[in-house]
Image (tube, rainbow, N blue to C red):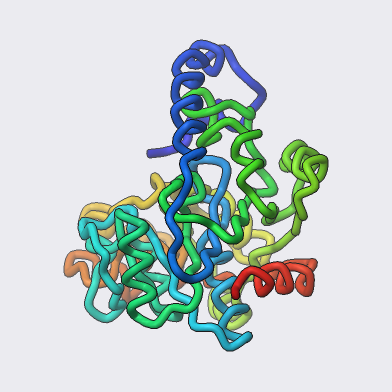
Amino acid sequence: MRDPAFWWYPESLVARMLAPGAAIYGAIAEQRMAKPGASAGVPVICIGNLTVGGAGKTPTALAVAALLRSAGKNPFVLSRGYGGTLEGPVRVDAARHRAADVGDEPLLIARTVPTVIARDRVSGAEAARAGGADVIVMDDGFQNPSLKKDLAIVVVDGRRGIGNGCVFPAGPLRAPLKPQLRRAHAVLVIGAPEGAGEIVSVAQAKGLPVFFGELEPDTAALAAIRGRPVLAFAGIGDPEKFFATLSSSGVDVVERFAFADHHRFSASDARGLLARAGTQGLQLVTTEKDRARMAGEPELMTLAATVQTLPVTLKVAEADAFRDLVLSKAG
């Protein structure tokens, strides 16, 4: 699904027409979020977001897991496994599983952090603890009430913020803003915060700590890409963020193709991208998450072998305070 454009601009006629449905959806979501969650038996740190679509949860989950490991903890990441067919609980094996099995994000995370996918978060937490986890990092699941969360960090895209501030389907919010913020412990704004002023003000007024971060591209990967014109493509929550990162890093982006979030690339897609790049002498570049969805798919082998990726790492401006907050809740 691609986000409707009207979500990210001031409230429109379409949003007003969808308001009755949004009110019903929001009331159900608010009621569901209010349910008490079960204890996982170990601390749970949830990385979520307020809106539908990408905001930088996966790099944040990886950064939090790295902080925990540096402190001697043994974190496991717990994910629903969106886009995969397996219900779980399953320990993700990056060498054996495909994105079609477990989802692209868990497959990417499992390369560096033990990862469990489960539709049932409680059983997933049990599997993680049985595997040796002494702290669980939930990648998404902020609105899911099944597990008690010791620390809930909501990630906000600095450019898009909370859009028109309306609840789905009239806007991008997953639930009404105030009930969501009542259950959050911190807000992390990723990228220049030009579109996040409203949420920053509301969060600060509620006494929530607000952190600011950037997704920094890998320098070696950038060096390999720079100097050649590229065809960039991405099927993530906000492909424009990826394209902007390339351009601001000095990469000559000649063409760009945006696919829907979690897009499953087909043989036709692969042929088209390879032909387009070959005709114009362009280097194909995509995200690590998109590249993960190609792994193990025979019809995508040539594309996967040809494309280059641009890994990114989260850097938080208030690094010490962020680390202290995470470790204070890690047990």
The reply to whether residue 230 is in sight is yes
Please provide percent x and percent y for residue 39: 45, 60
Name the residue rendered at 34%, 68% in the picture: 126
Residue in front for this viewpoint, 53 or 44: 44
Please provide percent x and percent y for residue 247: 64, 59
**What is the count of numbered marks?**
0
Residue in front for this viewpoint, 154 or 101: 154
In the rendered view of the protein, which quadrant contains the N terminus? top left
Please provide percent x and percent y for residue 89: 27, 65
Residue in front for this viewpoint, 325 or 20: 325
Residue in front for this viewpoint, 105 or 201: 201
Corner quadrant of residue 72: bottom right
Please provide percent x and percent y for residue 66: 57, 79
Name the residue rendered at 66%, 74% in the picture: 327
Name the residue rendered at 68%, 71% in the picture: 328
Name the residue rendered at 69%, 70% in the picture: 315
Corner quadrant of residue 206: top right
Q: Is residue 38 left or right of residue 167?
A: left
The reply to whether residue 281 is in sight is no
In the rendered view of the protein, which quadrant contains the C terminus? bottom right
Which residue is most to the left?
298
